[in-house]
């Protein structure tokens, strides 16, 4: 078994794809004609976005909409970069909200935390040593 993709349910798929392209320099790989599903080119594992309506059709009891939650949900998307400070500043300039400024952890990794306009929690981090 392997991780194939992560899907984030959002209010506006095209807007999320646009934000992620501007904030994190990731390229759009696919957007369905309906606008209800899209993917970013992130390497081996796909990062996808689907409209809340699609989520509602998959989960009869509904789901928590991250953009409506006052606190970030209990998961994050981690993006690895050699320049956490620069990536953090770029994301803020594109409309992300800072949750934690870049800092160096005791194990030597630099990390920061942001919240995207669609509610997604993002960790920016340097590669792990070793």
Image (cartoon, helix red, strand yellow):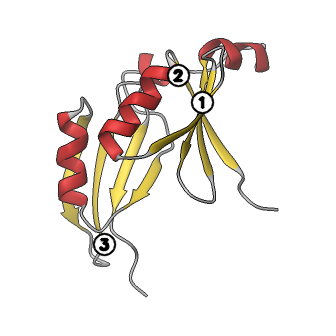
Q: Kindly state the secondary structure of the residue where label 1 is placed.
A: strand
Which mark is in front, 1 or 3? 1
- Asked if labels 3 and 1 touch by Cβ distance under 8 angstroms, the answer is no
Q: Give the residue at mark 1.
A: 38
- Asked if labels 2 and 3 touch by Cβ distance under 8 angstroms, the answer is no
The x and y percentages for residue 128 are 40, 76
Q: Give the residue at mark 3.
A: 109
Is residue 81 visible to the viewer in this orientation of the structure? Answer: yes
The x and y percentages for residue 65 are 53, 19
Residue drawn at x 30%, y 47% is 113
- How far apart are the alpha carbons under marks 3 and 2? 32 Å
| First along the sequence among labels 2 and 1 | 2
Residue drawn at x 41%, y 33% is 72
| First along the sequence among labels 3 and 2 | 2
Q: Quadrant of the C terminus?
A: bottom left
Q: Is residue 73 above or below residue 47?
A: above
The x and y percentages for residue 129 are 38, 83
| First along the sequence among labels 1 and 3 | 1
Is residue 102 visible to the viewer in this orientation of the structure? Answer: no
Q: Relative to the observer, which residue lies in front, 80 or 66?
A: 80
Q: Give the residue at mark 2.
A: 13
- Asked if labels 1 and 2 touch by Cβ distance under 8 angstroms, the answer is yes
């Amino acid at each position: 078994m392997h991780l194939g993709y992560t899907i984030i349910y959002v209010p506006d798929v095209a807007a999320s794809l646009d934000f992620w392209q501007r904030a994190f320099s990731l390229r759009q790989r696919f957007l369905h004609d309906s606008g209800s599903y899209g993917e970013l080119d992130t390497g081996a594992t796909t990062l996808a976005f689907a409209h809340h309506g699609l989520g509602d059709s998959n989960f009869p009891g509904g789901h928590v909409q991250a953009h409506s939650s006052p606190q970030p949900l209990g998961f994050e998307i981690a993006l690895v970069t050699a320049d956490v400070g620069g990536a953090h500043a770029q994301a803020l300039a594109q409309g992300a909200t800072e949750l934690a400024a870049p800092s160096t952890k005791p194990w030597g990794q630099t990390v920061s935390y942001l919240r995207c306009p669609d509610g997604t929690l993002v960790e920016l981090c340097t590669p792990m040593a070793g």
